[in-house]
Image (spheres, rainbow, N blue to C red):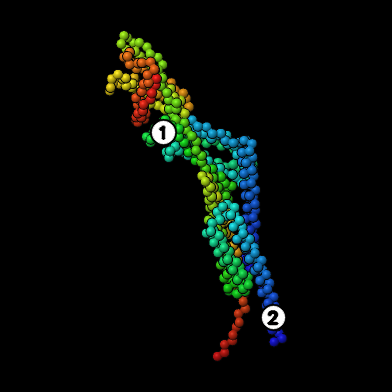
Amino acid sequence: MSLEAPKKKNKALVYAGRAVQAAIFVAINYAIFFIAPSVFYSNLGLLTPETVTAISSYFLIIGSLTVIHLLLKDHIIGFASSVALGIVQALYIYVITNGGVLSISYGGLSLTLEFKPLLYLMMATPLVNMVKQIMDYLSSSAAQPVQMVDVQE
Amino acid sequence: MEQPLASKGLRLVTLALSITLILILSTIAYSAYEDLAYVFEGLGSGEGMPQFSVNGTHLALSNLVLANRGVYPLHIELSSQVTIGGVDLGSASTGKIIIPPKTQKEINLTLPLDLTRVYSDYSLLKTMLFNGTMASFRMVVGFGLQPFVVASFGGGFNSSIGAALDDLAFRLQSLEPMNDTHVKADVEMEFTNRSPLMINGVLHAALPSARQRNLLYASDPLEVSAPPNQHYLGHLTFQLPKEEMKSGALYILNLVFETVGYKYEWNAAFRV
């Protein structure tokens, strides 16, 4: 019993650290994936209820996956959420930018903005990160010690 | 546990992508700011601003000077379309013009106007002959910072077009005796062609007798050719019995104007 106490304390500290890390990342994600698009669309006059719903929904998913990924780093669920996070972030960037084509109309004037190369560059970052997570997980799985059991006849 | 080489490499790739994205976004923002600042400075001072001119066959935009003060090649494409009453008169495009960084180019756009398309619409041509109308100019400006951003800005304006037979008037110019019974009446016709349309046609005029029903005195057909924005003077000559012309009387002319296969009939009055 006397040996169990420090282990629990360490575990609590680890999770506390991860919680702080998760809070910081959620705050960063909030700025990038919620505030930035909201301000951008609001300034262009394109902030429709559908856009607000899309931004909020994606941010909730991204926030949740970030928290799960960081809290359960050493678990398969943490790994799965990190992969899902990369996919959702890339998808969100694509959806929120309307595939890299934005159009504004005001009276008889219209402005169309196309930035597909930039969009692909923006999507590449979370996707490359996702590949890295998969490779990390596979290499850490391969490095796990294998317990040999002697079979006696 | 040491990270595998591939993982380290991917971490570097992620970092490089993020840095590249930030650099590109900041340089695009700088270039867009510099290029837009140039355009707005030009708008303020009037330098490099284009001049529009319209004649019967062409609409021209000239002397548009654009400078690229950014770091990316700037491409620009102007296209324009003119319609009158929904009838497409013509469209043109400059094609993609690329302005390398720190250079400037003069851009000209000439739009051929096929005004004969108006002739296919009877009511529209009638409107254009006798009343002012509106021409719609639609312009699309495409520009981009290669190879990252492409924007297109579309807008239009309406411009009033004057009547082709504006201020059309008839007046008795002279009355000369031909013989004991008849006189030659010279009726002057004048108008100003305030449209961009070249007016070509034949005018037939007839003067109903003041004394006898169903009797018309016809003049020789008058060939009318009036370029845009020009004053036109023509003469109709009638041979009439002496007693038909009475000083102070109001006469009604029956007019038929034949142009491109259509006939327009109307009446006009003149006083002796």
Residue position marked by numbered label 1 in the rendering: B127
Of the 4 image quadrants, the one containing the C terminus of chain B is top left
Quick one: B100 or A90, which is closer to the camera? A90
Q: Secondary structure at mark 1?
A: helix
Residue positioned 61% across, 57% down in the render = A36
Identify the amino acid type marked 2: Lys
Q: Chain of mark 2?
A: A
Residue B104, percent from left and from top: 61, 39
Identify the amino acid type marked 1: Thr
The label shown at residue B18 is: none
Residue position marked by numbered label 2 in the rendering: A7
* Mark 1 → mark 2, Cα distance in angstroms: 94 Å
Residue B229 versus residue B49 in the image, above or below = above
Residue positioned 44% across, 37% down in the render = B84
Of the 4 image quadrants, the one containing the N terminus of chain B is bottom right
Residue B30, percent from left and from top: 65, 48
Quick one: B193 or B137, which is closer to the camera? B193
Residue B204, percent from left and from top: 34, 23
